Image (cartoon, rainbow, N blue to C red):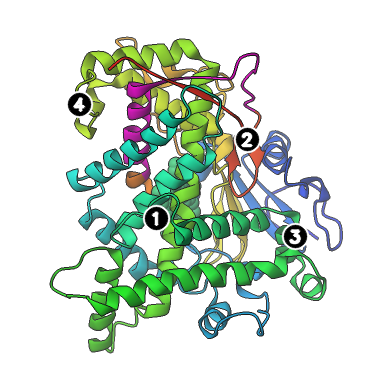
Amino acid sequence: RRPRSFPPGPRAFPLVGAPVCFSSHSLVLCLWQLSEKYGKVYSLKMGPSWTVVLNGLSALQEGLTKGDHLNDRPEFPIHSDVLPDLDTITEFSHFINRLFYTHCIIFSNGHMWKQQRRFALFTLKYFGVGKKSLEFSILDEFMYISKEIANHKGKPFNPHLIMNNAVSNIICSLVFGHRFEYGNEKFLKMMKLFDKGSQIEASIWAQLYNAFPVLMRRLPGPHHALQNIYGEIMDLIKTEVNQHKEDWNPSEPRDFIDCYLNEIQKDKRDDEADAGFNEDNLVMCGFDLFGAGSHTTSVTLRWALLYMTKYPEVQAKVQAEIDEVVGTSRQPSMEDRADLPYTDAVIHEIQRMGNIVPLSLPHVTTRDIRLGGYKIPKGVTIIPNLTSVLFDKNEWETPDAFNPGHFLNPEGKFVKRAAFIPFSAGKRVCLGENLARMELFLFFTSFMQRFSFSTPPGVEPVLKPRFGVTLSPPPFEICATPRKE
Ligand code: HEM
């Protein structure tokens, strides 16, 4: 039964909750449509637990940006509860499995989360997010993928792997201090494991596990493979940590791992700190940065290419602007952004329409609170429905159409929009927002400067998203024609 003074919502059935929202394909649509019936703040039962969904900019702002009562994450049994197969995993994986996800950035809470997040933000900034050094790494990486793309000689190819490789290498440079050749065995293994892991996380098995852990623990299925997959990724990161320790010089940190090793020493000296800086959490932080940072940016870049094939007139306008401002004799730089308002608007519109993290990540109430006039008790899961803001007809002139004009004033200057929140908002806003924005701008402008993209002859671009860990484009092939130097 719905608790008294709780927000309204669809009828809940015993055990299953609101079954209408159980199919992953329609979950985003379903949650959005329910707001038309029940209002901006409504509740529903997902499996056996109550969830409150926030819709529209003002409800999200009220929930996420005022106070710290929504700063925590709920616990997911699939992360913390699946028992490892002790015979097939290493000792280290076993240790990780027991602690799984309790102490890293994305799913940690309280003091630990604050310290780890603050450190990660500081370190990403130190190694160049927003600075020239990282800009060079991104532009350098573009030269590698540009060669790969040129090798296809205008023939159709699937850009999925190329985008993944490029973006993952940027995280590798920051965390490990080096990039990998695309054919490197270890790199390929890591990409494959992350792919497999996110497929399971996005499957109905994971949803069922989180809803009915006691039952799913006893039933066979792919959900049991997750811990081994993640254990293997952790082992790969651990190898990098061990290599770093061999020639680590505390006064000259080379990357995220070196800085974290320094922090571990500081934490050991300070008995009071208890901020969780230890080697296991270092590995988990690395895992989080890869997990959250590679797939998201790579999916957005794939949307970008797909939208450019769908709207060749927009592509031509972007290319004309880049030709005029940057020319062809040098690579684009972040300093060009202010002079490329149309290109910037197109990137923002791709992110709005791509809507890759449609329901953000879940939060949980840390105490009894009032939201939208309703009383919500401590411990209730909150879903910030970003889709309801990114497609709100009261916020956008043409919410369902691809229209870069949403981000341009009548003089053609770029304008910020409060309802542009693909990275969410508040204290738990995406930690990699600045990095992602840099990557998207530099990769996209470089693509447009060097190539023209089109669909293979006779093929129409399909923009219907696939629901997984993110909303991603369906697999597609593309032709890249080099532009004149
Ligand atoms: C286009 C690219 C990206 C999008 C759209 C995106 C979106 C998001 C969203 C919606 C959240 C949840 C925020 C919330 O809970 O309210 C999030 C969290 C997070 N993102 Fe991103 N993200 C992107 C790229 C990145 C990158 C490149 C990194 C790598 C550094 C990253 C690291 C993280 C982390 C660590 C969190 C968890 C933050 C926390 O719990 O404190 N993201 N992201």
Count of residue discs? 4
> Magenta span covers which residues?
436-463
Query: Relative to residue 226, is residue 172 drawn left or right?
Result: left
Quick check: marks 4 and 2 in contact, CB under 8 Å?
A: no
Q: Which residue is mark 2?
A: 475
At numbered mark 2, what does the secondary structure look like: helix, strand or loop?
loop
Residue 293 placement (x, y as % from top left): 43, 51
Marks 4/3: CA distance? 49 Å
Q: In the rendered view, would you say 406 is above or below 79? A: above
Quick check: marks 1 and 2 in contact, CB under 8 Å?
A: no
Q: Earlier in the sequence, mark 1 or mark 3?
A: 3
Q: Residue 387's quadrant in the figure?
A: top right
For the point 46% across and 35% down, the residue is: 301
Q: Which residue is mark 1?
A: 427
Q: Earlier in the sequence, mark 4 or mark 2?
A: 4
Closer to viewer: mark 1 or mark 2: 2
Q: In the rendered view, would you say 296 is above or below 107? A: above
For the point 25% across and 60% down, the residue is: 122
Q: Which residue is mark 4?
A: 330
Closer to viewer: mark 4 or mark 3: 4
At numbered mark 1, what does the secondary structure look like: helix, strand or loop?
loop
Task: Name the amino acid, label 3.
Answer: Trp
